[in-house]
Image (cartoon, helix red, strand yellow):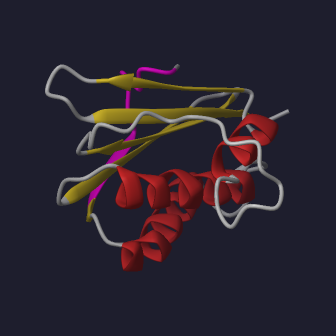
Amino acid sequence: MSDCSDVVARQVFASDERQVAAARRWVAKVIGDGHPVVDDCVLLTSETFTNAVVHGGGEQVEVSVEPDVRGVTVAVVDGGGGALPHYVDDPCGVGGRGLPILRALAAEWGFRVLEDGRLRVWFYLASE
């Protein structure tokens, strides 16, 4: 699941915070309005895409979606930027809520630095 080896859909966006809404709409369209995890996928795509833009570097962010009979895997790949995802436990902080939200909603999630230095952050949401 986590490697997105049988990706159904992949889209490349500019690494720009103004593209977050476009990425959310694209993921929702790929998954479909009636899918039980579409809202959570859209929320987590927003969080991971925003992190990719803010921390990832590079000019592009790639989003892939792999639905299967048990759920949906979404992966967001950024330029790498040298920053790895890390949990911030500061409920009064201005930011840092993305990973806690990811941990709360996703059945599984993780990240991997690719051979070319880019960073892939992925999450899996079960349909049950």
Which residue is the extreme one toward the bottom?
18
Q: Nearer the viewer, residue 96 or 51?
A: 96
- Is 30 covered by the magenta stretch? no
Q: Residue at x 44, y 65 (%)?
A: 23
Q: Residue at x 66, y 28 (%)?
A: 69
Q: Give the quarter of the image for residue 109.
A: top right
Taking 63 as reference, is 98 left or right? right
Q: Position of residue 29 (x, y in %)?
A: 52, 64
Q: Give the quarter of the image for residue 33.
A: bottom right
Q: Position of residue 39 (x, y in %)?
A: 73, 59
Q: Give the quarter of the image for residue 54.
A: bottom left
Q: Nearer the viewer, residue 93 or 18?
A: 93
Q: Residue at x 38, y 52 (%)?
A: 55
Taking 32 as reference, is 100 left or right? right
Q: Position of residue 65 (x, y in %)?
A: 46, 43
Q: Split into 4 quadrants, where in the image is the C terminus?
A: top right
Q: Is residue 127 above or below residue 50?
A: above
Q: Nearer the viewer, residue 77 or 80?
A: 80
Q: Nearer the viewer, residue 99 or 128?
A: 99
Q: Which residues are magenta?
A: 2-12
Tell me which secondary structure the magenta stretch mostly adopts.
Answer: loop
The number of callouts visible is 0
Taking 4 as reference, is 58 left or right? left
